[in-house]
Structure formats: structure tokens, C-alpha cells
Image (tube, rainbow, N blue to C red):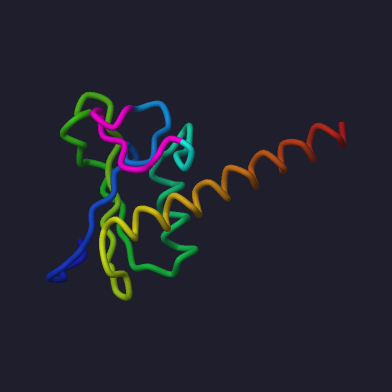
């Protein structure tokens, strides 16, 4: 666990396009990802060169029955949690585009 005075906690539900704002989504639907999971958030943190840790045993309180865990991020150089969520969402959307183009290449080669 990151032992810092200040850290941000990110749940996959913050970025899930299938959830409503009331269910925990924190970003606009057009910037959300359809199937967000811990690995996508971790990839985005790694891409942004942030210090992070995955905690699989934790649950999101609004979705405790099916929550898969959370990512704890040390926010050095980031002003607010909202800014961090927006940056992670942008990287996650790019990751989705990369996955789609990778699938297209596979289907063309067959």
C-alpha cells in the first residue's frame, strides 16, 4: 500500500459507459469506456508514469456485489482527482481504439 499523506482511489465504475452517474460513473458517457477493468486503469497509470497499486480485495460501495477492486494512485504533479480521472479516461479511450485496430488487422490477415 502506498503510504503517502495524499493519494487518490480509482474504481473501474468511474469509467464504465454502461453505468449511470447515480451508479458511480464520474465522467461523461462520450468519454467513458464500455468494458473498463483494473488492467486498463493500471495501463493508463503506467502510460502517465504514475505510481500506483492495485487492490483486488476492495469493493466499490455503490456496486459492492460485483466490484472487482480499485487502484490507489500517488498523485504527484496532478492538481485534483477530477484531473486525474479525465487523464485516465483519455488514455483508456485511446487503448480501446488500439484494441479495435488490432482486431481489424487480425481479421484482414485471415
Position in image of residue 55 (x %, y %): 26, 49
Going 49% across and 53% down the picture, which residue do you hit? Answer: 90
Going 31% across and 52% down the picture, which residue do you hit? Answer: 54
The picture quadrant where one finds residue 97 is top right
Going 46% across and 47% down the picture, which residue do you hit? Answer: 40
Q: The magenta stretch spans which residues?
A: 20-29
Position in image of residue 51 (x %, y %): 34, 68
- Residue farthest to the left, as pictured: 5
Position in image of residue 81 (x %, y %): 26, 58
The picture quadrant where one finds residue 37 is top left
- Residue farthest to the right, as pictured: 109
Magenta span: chief secondary structure: loop
Name the side, left or right, on which 86 lies relative to 21. right
The N terminus - image quarter: bottom left
Position in image of residue 87 (x %, y %): 42, 58
The C terminus - image quarter: top right
Going 29% across and 74% down the picture, which residue do you hit? Answer: 76
- Residue farthest to the bottom, as pictured: 77
Name the side, left or right, on which 98 lies relative to 108. left
Name the side, left or right, on which 80 lies relative to 107. left
The picture quadrant where one finds residue 6 is bottom left
Asked whether 28 falls inside the magenta stretch, the response is yes
Choose between 2 and 75: the one closer to the eye.
75
Q: Is residue 93 shown above or below 23?
A: below
Asked whether 109 falls inside the magenta stretch, the response is no
Q: Is residue 34 shown above or below 11?
A: above
Q: What is the number of callouts on the image?
A: 0
Amino acid at each position: 500500500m502506498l503510504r503517502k499523506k495524499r493519494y487518490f482511489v480509482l474504481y473501474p465504475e468511474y469509467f464504465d459507459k454502461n453505468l449511470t452517474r447515480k451508479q458511480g460513473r464520474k465522467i461523461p458517457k462520450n468519454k467513458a469506456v464500455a468494458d473498463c477493468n483494473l488492467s486498463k486503469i493500471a495501463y493508463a497509470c503506467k502510460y502517465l508514469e504514475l505510481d500506483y497499486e492495485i487492490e483486488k480485495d476492495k469493493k466499490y460501495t455503490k456496486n459492492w456485489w460485483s466490484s472487482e477492486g480499485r487502484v490507489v494512485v500517488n498523485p504527484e504533479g496532478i492538481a485534483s482527482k477530477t484531473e486525474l480521472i479525465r487523464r485516465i479516461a483519455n488514455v483508456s479511450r485511446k487503448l480501446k481504439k488500439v484494441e479495435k485496430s488490432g482486431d481489424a488487422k487480425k481479421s484482414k490477415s485471415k
